[in-house]
Structure formats: structure tokens, C-alpha cells
Amino acid sequence: MATISKQFLAGANGTGIKIVQTTSAGTLIHTAIAGATDIDEIWIWACNTDTSALTLTLEWGSADVDDNIKMVIQPSETVLVVPGLILQNGLTVRGFCATANKINCFGYANRLDV
């Protein structure tokens, strides 16, 4: 029988992860569970603490630009940027923004042990 457990993102213990990197490879946000059987369902919200709009780039599983997720986040806005997408095999989610230390990421992973 499958079980689900809520996990902290790998880069934090429930606190925000400040996006420090301005280019690839980005700041580590999460490392998915190792192996090809179990999966992590990942939820991430991003908050822009700057006074201008910023583009957050998430490297989803690799630094290949074809695997990137990009979103423009307005000042003082917190938005859902990863709505439960899944990842496994120890792949990582990393983030970068042209302006360092102005985007914070919050969230969790639902670990599905099947």
C-alpha cells in the first residue's frame, strides 16, 4: 500500500530559501528521492521582496534550458510557481534570478512511497 509523507524542501527546514545565485547552476531548493519507484510531488511558492518585477528561473531536474520553468514575479507578491509537479531519481530543483537575494522560495514535497 502506498504511503504519503510531507517533507521539507531540501534547502530548508520550513523556512524560506533565499535565491542567491544569479546564473546556472542555481541555488538548491530540493533534491528528489533517489530511485525510480518512489516520487516527490513538489509545491513551491516564490516571494519577491524587491521593488521591481523579477524573473525566477527554476532548473527542473537539470540545467538544460529546455527543462527550465520561468515566471515573472511582481514586487511584494507571493505566487505558486510549482503546482505539485513530480520528480524522482535524486534529481534537483535549483533556482536563480538576475538580482540576488530578492526572491524567497517556500514549500514542501509530498513523498509518495509506492
Image: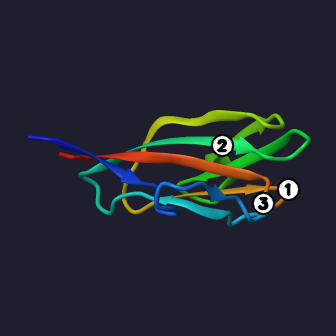
In the rendered image, the vertical position of residue 111 relative to residue 73, given as above or below = below
Q: Which residue is mark 2?
A: 46
Amino acid, disc 2: Ala
The residue at 48%/54% (across/down) is 14
Q: Select label 1 or label 2 by which is in front.
A: 2
Secondary structure, mark 2, is strand
In the shown orientation, is residue 106 left or right of residue 34? right
Looking at the rendered structure, the secondary structure element under dot 3 is loop
* Residue at x-position 68% and y-position 63%: 26
Residue 40: percent from left, percent from top:
36, 48
Look at 66% across and 43% down and name the residue there: 46
Identify which amino acid the numbered label 3 is placed on: Asn
Mark 1 vs 2: CB contact within 8 A = no
Quickly name the residue at label 3.
101
Mark 2 packing: few (<14 Cα in 10 Å), some, or many (20+)? Answer: many
Element class at badge 1? loop
Residue, disc 1 = 98
Q: Nearer the viewer, residue 112 or 107?
A: 107
Disc number lying in front (3 or 1): 3
The vertical placement of 60 against 19, above or below, is: above
Residues at marks 1 and 2, CA–CA distance in whole angstroms: 15 Å
Mark 2–mark 3 Cα distance, whole angstroms, equals 12 Å
- Location of the C terminus (image quadrant): top left
